Structures are given as C-alpha cells and as structure tokens.
Amino acid sequence: MALPQVVIQPHAAKRVRHHDGWIFRDEIVRAPEGLPAGELVEAVTDRGGFAATCAFNPASHIPLRVFTTTSGDTIDRAWLARRLARAVAKRARITGTDAKRLVFSEADGLPGLIADQYGTALVIQIRTAGMERLRDLMVDLLHEQLQPSGILERSDKEFRQEEGLAPTAGVLRGAVPERILIREEPWQFWVDPHHGLKTGFYLDQRLTRQKLRQAVEPNHRVLDTFSYTGSMGIAAATRGARVVCVEQQEPFVELAKENAKLNGVADRMEFVAGNAFYWLDAQAKGPSRYDWVVLDPPALAKSKAATQQGRRALHHLLVQGLRALAPEGRMLLSVCTYHLLRDLEEIVRIAAGDDDVRLTVCDQWTQASDHPWILQLPATRYLASWLLERDAPSAA
Ligand SMILES: C[S@@+](CC[C@H](N)C(=O)[O-])C[C@H]1O[C@@H](n2cnc3c(N)ncnc32)[C@H](O)[C@@H]1O
C-alpha cells in the first residue's frame, strides 16, 4: 500500500541521502492534514523524487525520522527483524561483559528505540511517536531474537514530552528483578534497572572505567564527584587508590557501597551523600589535595537556550576541581551536555586560565562503541571525556 507523502526541501533530501537521519520542521514544504503521530510516510521533493521512508510526528521539532533511504523498502516485520539482528550482531565483538547497549536508536537505523542488555534481562526505552506505533512488534522481535528472562520498559523520562507521549515504565515480558548483577571485567556491579538513571547503569562509560584503571597508580588519592553507583571510583580503587565518592542521591550512595564491597575495595573507599558543587568548593578552599579529580556531572544544559547557564556551571566545576588537585595531579572530565561539546576546549582553557594552571591534554575519547558515533548524525556523539594533567608550577 502506498504511503502518504510529505514534501520536503531539496537540501533536506540531499542531506538525508547523505545519511543524515532527521528532517526539521522548517524543511517541510507540505504534509497531508490529519496524519496520526508516528505514521510511516514517504519524504519526497516537490519534483516527486523519493528521499526516504520516515516516521512522521507533526508535534515534534524533528517531525521526520528516517528509517530507510532505499526506495521500495517496506518497513514491516521482516525488515525490522533484519535491522535488529544487524544491531545485535555488531555488539558481538564487545567481550568481557554481559551488559551492553544492543540498539542505539538512529545509530542502528531504528529511530526512537534503545535496548540495553543487563545479564539475561533487557531494558528498553521508546523515545518517539514513530517507535511507539511499532512498540509491540519490536518487543516481540526482541523476545524472539534474544530470549531474555524479562523485558523492562523505562520510557519514564522527559524526552517523551516533546513527542507528545506520556511517560511510562513497567515490565513488558517475563520478570525483571529489583537488582541485577552484571559483569564488566574485571568488575561486577549491582544495577537497579527499575529506579536507576538511564536504563540503570552508565554503559557508555565502559571505556572511561578502563582508561581510569590503567592511569591511576596505587596509593593515589582520588576524588570521584557525581559518582552515582560508584563505578569510576571502584575502577580507581581496584588499582589500589584511595577514593572519596560524592553523590547527591542517597539510594545511589547505598548501591555504590554495596558495589565497593562486591569488588573487594570497600576499605579504600569513602562515600559522601551530598552536593558535589559544595563539596568541591570546600575541597578547593581546604588543605586536602588530590592526585585525581573525576568530574562527571549530569547534563548541565538541557536545551540550547540553557547553554550559557551550563557553561557557567561547568566553568565553576573545572576551576574548583583544578584547585583541589595536587601539582601534577590529573583530572578526568566527562561531559554529556551536548550543547557544550562544541565549545569544550574553550571552556577548559578559560577555566585553566582563571586558575593560572597549564594543562596537558593526555587523552580524549567519546562514549563506548556500543553507542556508535555516526559521523552524519551529529547527536550520536554526545559524550566527551578528557584526561588532563596539571603541570607542576616549575614547568610553566
Ligand atoms: C553522569 S552521572 C555520573 C555517572 C557515574 N560517574 C558513573 O559512571 O556511574 C551524574 C550523577 O550526578 C548525580 N548528581 C546530580 N547533581 C548532583 C550534585 N549537585 N551533587 C552530587 N551529585 C549530583 C546524579 O544523581 C548522578 O548520579
């Protein structure tokens, strides 16, 4: 059956043919009236040229999300099954863990779907109206292809508002326990999939944990701010470092303590339930100096409009973090605020200047490879991690 057609600007058609996945509101020339949110449509140019098959949501500021640019593809069960199988197969090369992202939305050609594996269970998020209409089909396919012990939905975040969807969460298939034990060699972690942030664990920081473990030395003093369930602090403590973790939410601090015990490093870790901004301010003024400061704050600007505010917050954290460092101390900075990434170098340079500190950039990386960064989909690169070293004063 022919799909309804939405006419788009020629430049948008060209971009999409070059693998971009989004068509914005001001790039739509004409759309049929009354199409329900999430309907599959053909995006075409005024001359009738086919550009892509997309899910359409007139309420969203990204009304068209591309499923395929191959004319003649039908987005049916078999097509979706192939896309899913391809996404899962790509993750087979990630070894040493039973916790990974299996589907990363547009990056895997399944816009709006997140599927994370935690041991034998799956935790999913449905982020768009287009994927909401395919929900039952996708849950069936996930069940069929992966045979999980349970599937939990965690679509309870604010991102659905923009798509006109209500938040929702709950077990869709089988059973999903309150806590799941995952393996990420050489560690194990307890994850709370029902109440944890994201789908329960920062799977995207797998590489960061490994880098930290390699760089930290025994007896280093590490301050892990915004520590959530302790994974970065634990990565440092397993190398013999002494770690202070600061996290605002008490339930996460409790889980972090259990994770420290689980990994045999509880005697080297201290946990503070409190505001990391205030804690860093106090450390910067006080006598303690750390060999490492880990800064992994939450998103500091949720929209472009809030960028300036986010910039000020990050600047403050950097200045105080640098002050809390010993000479030649190191900072691990992770920024997940998309709107700050472009200016990150400048923000760090200004903060270092305010502290009169010369910094060496020892390493830089992005999110772990099961959250693929697709060059033509800029939003798929959403995390920047930097390893910085403070030069000794005499080196300046
Ligand atoms: C990006 S996550 C950190 C993830 C963690 N590093 C990991 O790898 O598991 C940010 C954390 O900061 C916490 N948080 C948010 N605001 C905070 C504040 N003002 N002080 C301390 N923690 C805060 C959140 O509860 C969340 O756990």
Image (tube, rainbow, N blue to C red):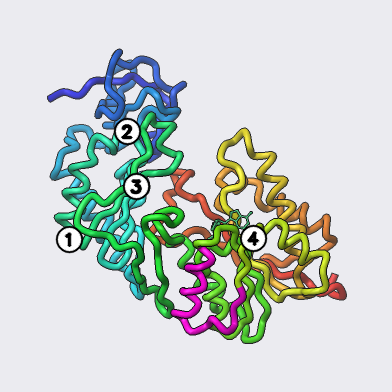
Q: Establish whether ligand 1 lies closer than 8 Å to the Cβ of label 4.
A: yes
* Cα–Cα span, label 1 and label 4: 41 Å
Q: Which mark is residue 147?
A: 1
Q: Secondary structure at mark 2?
A: helix
From this view, report whether residue 389 is shown above or below residue 4.
below
Q: Residue at x 37, y 58 (%)?
A: 193
Give percent across and percent down for residue 327. 79, 75
Point out the image quarter for the C terminus. bottom right
From this view, report whether residue 8 is shown above or below residue 302.
above
Q: Secondary structure at mark 3?
A: strand
Q: Do labels 4 and 3 touch, CB within 8 Å?
A: no
Residue 320: which quarter of the image? bottom right
Q: Main structural element of the magenta stretch: helix, strand or loop? A: helix
Q: Amino acid at mark 1?
A: Gln
Which comes before the other along the chain, label 3 or label 1? Answer: 3
In this picture, residue 262 sits left or right of residue 281:
left
Give percent across and percent down for residue 130. 29, 34
* Cα–Cα span, label 3 and label 2: 12 Å
Q: Which residues are magenta?
A: 252-270
Q: Residue 97 colored magenta?
A: no
Q: Establish whether ligand 1 lies closer than 8 Å to the Cβ of label 3.
A: no
Q: Amino acid at mark 3?
A: Gln
Residue at the spot of label 4 = 274
Q: Amino acid at mark 2?
A: Ala
Q: Which mark is residue 119?
A: none
From this view, report whether residue 95 is shown above or below residue 20.
below
Q: Residue at x 60, y 67 (%)?
A: 363
Residue at the spot of label 2 = 129
Does any portion of residue 223 appear in the rendered image?
yes
Residue at the spot of label 3 = 125
